[in-house]
Image (cartoon, helix red, strand yellow):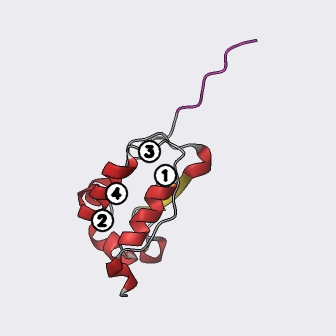
Amino acid sequence: MPNTPNPVAVVCPLCGRPIPPAQRDAHHLVPKSKGGRSTTYLHRVCHRQIHAVLTETELARHYATVDALLAHPELQTFVAWVRTKPDDFFVSTRKSARMKKR
């Protein structure tokens, strides 16, 4: 029986961990509602955290790249924490206090 190579792992550009297929979400760097088309795969937990912290307008205007997302203080704290978790880790996400006020 021939060896079949493992498919190349998709790595989350936010946290740097491999993304299991069941935890893979496509994130529009510029939200679709703001005309975005380009996507990148993220862990579901990372994707949800982005949307819990930032509005679609903020994403479109200031955080339309992975580097810009990684520069956001709340996301930096989250990424430092989630990097220590297993690749298939998932926890429900809460909106930030600032987002709840909107």
Residue 58 to residue 6: above or below: below
Task: Measure the C-alpha gap from mark 2 to mark 4.
Answer: 16 Å
Q: Secondary structure at mark 1?
A: strand
Question: In whole angstroms, how far apart are the C-alphas of marks 4 and 3?
Answer: 11 Å
Relative height, residue 57 to residue 85 (above, below) = below
99 or 5: nearer the eye? Answer: 99
| Amino acid type assigned to the residue bearing label 1 in the image | His
Residue drawn at (29%, 57%) of the image: 77
Task: Evaluate whether residue 33 shows in this view.
Answer: yes
Residue sitting farthest toward the right? 1
Q: Secondary structure at mark 2?
A: loop
Residue identified by numbered label 4: 78
Q: Position of residue 9 (x, y in %)?
A: 52, 35
Tell me which segment is drawn in magenta: 1-8
Q: Nearer the viewer, residue 87 or 29?
A: 87
> Badge 2 is on which residue?
63
Question: Which amino acid, mark 2?
Answer: Tyr
State the residue at coordinates (38%, 47%). 15
The residue under label 3 is: 85
Mark 3 or mark 2: which comes first in sequence? 2
